[in-house]
Image: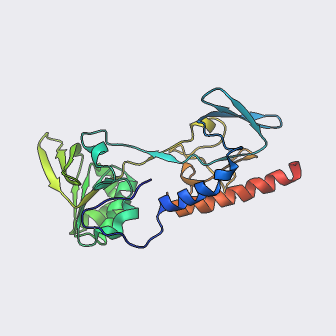
């Protein structure tokens, strides 16, 4: 996790998500004897608990499991994207919208997440370009509001060709449905193509929603007793660090309550 760098932006006093994560990480350093830094391939139900199988083929037994594997971003996979990540281009407009007061921004995406990001930016930015949205998405209440906004330009079905800039990303080369290329300038840009939950290790075991997020109740419980989940991998509202921290605490308390009569 990194801080978005922008040429006009000075450091300001906020608590960043990366700082919170690092503080939790440092608190757990002394537990190195019980930490296993391995990728999990699968979780299987056993008669008396669960078997966790790692990608290396090792197996661990548990009476309860908490899934907090998060999500991964969908990438543009175009020239310039990797070079400008967090230098004018990032993946969370909601986190950085306050930096774009009276500035120009670009949002790249074709779903609800992109529309929400444009709506957030449009409240403070001088102008916002939305690139790549499909017509059906604009029929929602938020889509109709953005179409009517004076400071929002919508480029339906446009494709991103290249991210451009010098030290920072400030230009985006796009192609229209008719094949015409044009360059858009902005003070920063956001890729909002959606998040892919890392839920594959419990697929077929617990209930997932249509986006493959783990379904949980208000106690962070899945449909399988003994399996709990928290954070962005679940169908909980809002993909934000503070929300995930709270959900993680809830899942830990629920797992503890589940284990108490079984210890």
Q: Nearer the viewer, residue 38 or 114?
A: 38
The location of residue 98, given as percent across then percent down, is 35, 70
Give the residue displayed 23% in from the left and 57% down from the top.
154
Q: Nearer the viewer, residue 229 or 82?
A: 82
Residue 185, located in which quarter of the rendered image?
A: bottom left
Give the residue displayed 60% in from the left and 29% down from the top.
55
Give the residue displayed 70% in from the left and 46% down from the top.
223
Q: Nearer the viewer, residue 237 or 93?
A: 93
Does residue 198 appear left or right of residue 99 in this picture?
right
Does residue 17 appear left or right of residue 26 in this picture?
left
- The colour scheme applied to this rendered structure is rainbow
Q: Please say whether residue 190 is visible from this viewpoint.
A: no
Count of marks placed on residues: 0
Residue 88, located in which quarter of the rendered image?
A: bottom left
The location of residue 157, given as percent across then percent down, is 24, 46
Q: Nearer the viewer, residue 29 or 41?
A: 29
The location of residue 204, given as percent across then percent down, is 63, 35
Q: Please say whether residue 212 is visible from this viewpoint.
A: yes
The location of residue 221, given as percent across then percent down, is 69, 52
Does residue 205 appear left or right of residue 74 in this picture?
right
Give the residue displayed 85% in from the left and 54% down from the top.
260
Q: Residue furthest front?
A: 30
| Up-down relation of residue 254 to residue 222 (above or below) | below
Does residue 122 appear left or right of residue 185 in this picture?
right
């Amino acid at each position: 996790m990194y801080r978005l760098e922008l040429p006009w932006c000075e450091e300001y006093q906020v608590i960043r998500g990366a700082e919170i994560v690092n503080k939790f990480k440092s608190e757990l350093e002394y537990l190195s004897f019980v930490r296993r830094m391995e990728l999990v391939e699968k979780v299987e139900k056993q008669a008396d608990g669960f078997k966790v199988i790692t990608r290396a083929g090792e197996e661990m037994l548990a009476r309860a499991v908490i899934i907090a594997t998060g999500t991964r971003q969908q990438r543009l996979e175009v020239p310039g994207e990797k070079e400008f990540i967090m230098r004018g281009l990032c993946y969370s407009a909601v986190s950085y919208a306050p930096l774009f007061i009276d500035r120009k921004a670009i949002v790249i995406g074709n779903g609800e997440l992109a529309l929400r990001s444009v709506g957030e930016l449009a409240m403070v930015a001088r102008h916002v370009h939305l690139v790549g949205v499909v017509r059906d998405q604009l029929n929602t209440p938020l889509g109709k509001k953005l179409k009517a906004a004076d400071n929002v330009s919508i480029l339906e079905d446009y494709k991103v060709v290249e991210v451009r800039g010098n030290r920072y990303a400030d230009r985006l080369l796009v192609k229209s449905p008719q094949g015409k290329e044009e360059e858009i300038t902005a003070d920063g840009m956001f890729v909002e193509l959606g998040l892919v939950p890392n839920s594959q290790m419990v697929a077929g075991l617990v209930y997932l929603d249509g986006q493959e997020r783990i379904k949980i109740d208000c106690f962070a419980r899945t449909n399988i007793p003994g399996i709990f989940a928290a954070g962005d991998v679940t169908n909980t509202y809002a993909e934000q660090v503070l929300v995930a921290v709270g959900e993680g605490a809830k899942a830990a308390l629920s797992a503890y309550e589940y284990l108490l009569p079984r210890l």
